[in-house]
Image: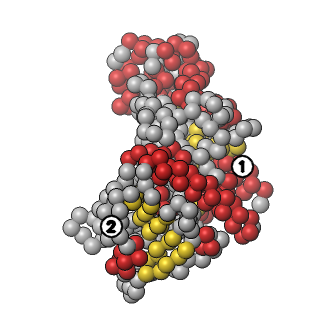
Amino acid sequence: MNQAIAKLYQQHLDGLRSYVDRALERCGFERLLIASGNPRMHFLDDQGPAFVSSPHFLHWLPLTQAPGSWIDYRPGTTPRLIFLQPRDYWHLTPQSPQGYWVDAFDIVTVDTVAAAQQIIGTLSDTTAIIGEPGSTSPLTSNNPEQLLNQLHWNRASKSAYEQLLMRAASRIGVAGHRAAASAFQSGASEFEIHLAFLTATRLSEVELPYPNIIGLNEHGAVLHYTGLERQAPTERRSFLIDAGGCYAGYASDITRTYASDPNGPFAELIADMERMQQELCTAVQPGGPYPDLHTKCHRQLGDILTKQQLVNCSGEAAYEQGITRSFFPHGLGHLLGLQVHDIGGHQAGPDGDKVEPPEQHPFLRLTRTLETDMVVTIEPGLYFIDQLLEPLAASPAGNDVNWERVEFFKPFGGIRIEDDVLCTQGAAVNLTREAWDAIAMV
Ligand code: GLY
Ligand code: MN
Ligand code: MN
């Protein structure tokens, strides 16, 4: 395994380097410095959020906890890692680099920021410095926009090495989901389900790729609900969990919705949504514009609304009148990788032109055409959200809605089903289902 990953890593780095070489040349730079970043503090406080490394840094190596370190790269030379290992008895200092990737770097360990600065030496105006503004001491980042656009564009395509890490992130997330589902079945509160997820993933809360969304009953209708009620509700109707794993900085992003009554109407609605979601996952094919999938989803959702008697009109009429947008207000999905909503989803090309989402679908995070080796999420939803249903009721289209049926479903909150899908030349690879099946076999 170690040899296999070392080889994949080397291929990843070779590919990244040759892309970066071309990008630097195009943008007129001779040297690239990438900061891992520094911990931030809360306002007027000596406490702060957990350190999260820059994704630019993590694209080169899997060193997630090395604040104050730098990658220093000049095309044609071995990349250098300036690794900060302070002599600090207040905090855990980062462990010396080890593993399959270290031979690819010329590693210089320093114990102070000043020493790092000395190693970095003189900067010229052909040095690109990438890092979060205000978080790159001792240097000031310049984040050249043209170069960033090129690098962000490239991030969408995942090397075989990255795919391996994302498969690991999927398995971790799925382990958490399985534990969460059994916690729900045994009557746990949202908070207890959250703890079950953490225990199974062996991730601490700050290591999660995004805060767990764990909603019972009506809470499923709050898209990014993070309330974590300590008390279990007396009546348990439904459970929506959107939670992921993380491995070497790479995320999985997984959502499941469950009905307490496996034979009731809400379970039936979930089944319809899942059939549609699975069909959309298989439609992840190179050459297809992602917004087309989003539109296809809305049309099919219209049919589900008709079938489930939530509307009294045809699915097509529900779509045409915008009714589906009141039930499904977010985008079908997004790029996934080192960031949950991986950057570059609206880029038209590597040079910075953008394809904005359609006016009626402003929250669509991905407007690019699908390409081999992209990993995207497919996450259709159907929710009963008062803030969206009230204006619908007041509009002419509201006459086509079966409000009694809507009221019936409101106490169940909503449905979202989300898988992470790798686009290939052949059939789409559903990383989430693959991990789910693999864990089921153990
Ligand atoms: N977990 C956030 C999302 O699904 O986009
Ligand atoms: Mn997502
Ligand atoms: Mn999600």
Question: Residue at (65%, 34%) from the top-left corner?
Answer: 286
Quick check: can you spot residue 95? yes
x, y percent for residue 104? 61, 69
Residue at the extreme right = 441
Question: Residue at (61%, 50%) from the top-left corner?
Answer: 158
- Can you tell which quarter of the image residue 45 is in? bottom left
Q: Nearer the viewer, residue 335 or 400?
A: 335
- Colouring scheme applied when the structure was drawn: secondary structure
State the SS at label 2: loop
Q: Which residue is mark 1?
A: 434
Q: CA distance from mark 2 to mark 1?
A: 44 Å
Q: Is residue 418 left or right of residue 357?
A: right
Question: Residue at (72%, 70%) from the top-left corner?
Answer: 2
Question: Residue at (43%, 63%) from the top-left corner?
Answer: 33
x, y percent for residue 414? 50, 37
In the rendered structure, find residue 368 and report the number of the disc placed on it: none
**Amino acid type, residue under disc 1 in the picture:** Glu
Q: Is residue 27 left or right of residue 162?
A: left
Disc 2 beta carbon < 8 A from ligand 1?
Answer: no
Disc 1 beta carbon < 8 A from ligand 2?
Answer: no
x, y percent for residue 100? 65, 71
Q: Which residue is mark 2?
A: 139
Quadrant holding the C terminus: bottom right
**Amino acid type, residue under disc 2 in the picture:** Leu
Quadrant holding the N terminus: bottom right
N-terminal label among 2 and 1: 2
